[in-house]
Amino acid sequence: TNAMTFSTADAERVRITSTGNVGIGTTASTRPLEVYKTGTEAPLQVRSNLTTYVGVGFRESPAAGADMGFVGIKRTDSPSSSDSEVHIRNSKSGTVSTSMVIDTAGNVGIGTTTPSGKLHVKSAFAGSFTYDTSADDLIVESNANGGITIATAAANTGRVIFASPDDATGSEISFNSSGGLMKVGTTNGTGQLVLQSGNGAEALRIDTSGNVGIGTTSPSAKLDVVGDINI
C-alpha cells in the first residue's frame, strides 16, 4: 500500500497513506489529517501559554498572514484559573473581531462579547440599562429600529406560542398571509385576554364567553362598561 506507519509498544499510532493523508488512531484516513479516538475525551487538545486566545485559526490563502477566522477559547481571569469563554472570530476588511461568544455562564452573544441573557443578539449599543431578569432569555439589541422576523410561505401560518407543562399551546400570536388573518389570544377553554395601559393597569378584558369588559374584570354582557361613556 506504500504507507508509512509509526508505532509504539508494538501498536500502530500514526499512518501516512500513499496519498499523503495522515491518520492518528485510524488506518484509513480520508483527509489530510484525521484524528480518531474512542471514549469521552477530546481526540485533539490545543495548548498554549498565551494569556488571551487559544484555538485554531483558519486562512484561505496558502500565503502567510493573519487568520481570517478563529475558533477557540479566551481565558477570562488569572492564568491559573480554568474559567474560559468560547469565541468564534472572523475577519472583515482586515480586522479580526469576535462574532459569537459563549461565556462562562453558558450565555450566547452574537455581536456582543458580554451577553446579558441566554441568547443576546446585538447590532448596536442601545444604551445603559438593566434588562428585566424575568424576560432575558432572548435579547435583541439595537440603537435603531430592531425586531424579530418570522417568515413563512404565503399559504402557511407564522406563530409565537406561549406554553407550559399544563398546556403546550396555551396562547398564541399568529398570522396567515394568504388569508390576511392575524390572531392574538388564548387557545384553551379557561383563557382570558387582557389589554393593559398606563403603568400595567388593565384597560380591557375578553372573558371565556367572549364578553368584553371595560372597567370591569367580570363582564356580564357582550359589552360591559363600568364608568362613563361618550358617544
Image (cartoon, helix red, strand yellow):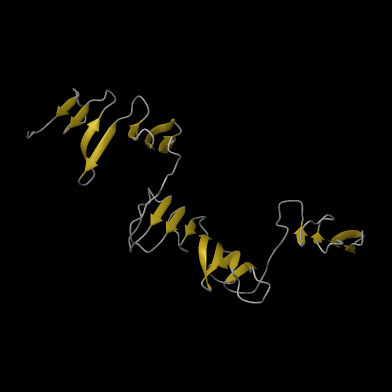
Q: State the residue in front, 18 or 179.
A: 179
Residue 7: x and y in percent read: 89, 63
* Number of numbered discs overlaid on the protein picture: 0
Question: Is residue 135 in view from this perspective?
Answer: yes
In screen coordinates, is 44 left or right of 70? right
In screen coordinates, is 36 left or right of 74? right
Q: State the residue in front, 231 or 54.
A: 231
Q: State the residue in front, 41 or 58.
A: 58
Give the position of the C terminus as an image quadrant.
top left
Residue 74: x and y in percent read: 56, 67
Outermost residue on the bottom side: it is 64
Residue 53, compared with residue 162, is above or below; it is: below
| Image-quadrant location for residue 211 | top left
Residue 55, compared with residue 149, is above or below; it is: below
Residue 215: x and y in percent read: 16, 34
Q: Give the residue drawn at x 26%, y 27%.
A: 207
Give the position of the N terminus as an image quadrant.
bottom right
Residue 42: x and y in percent read: 70, 57
Q: Give the residue drawn at x 17%, y 33%.
A: 214
Q: Give the residue drawn at x 29%, y 33%.
A: 193
Residue 39, compared with residue 48, is above or below; it is: above
Question: Is residue 103 in view from this perspective?
Answer: no
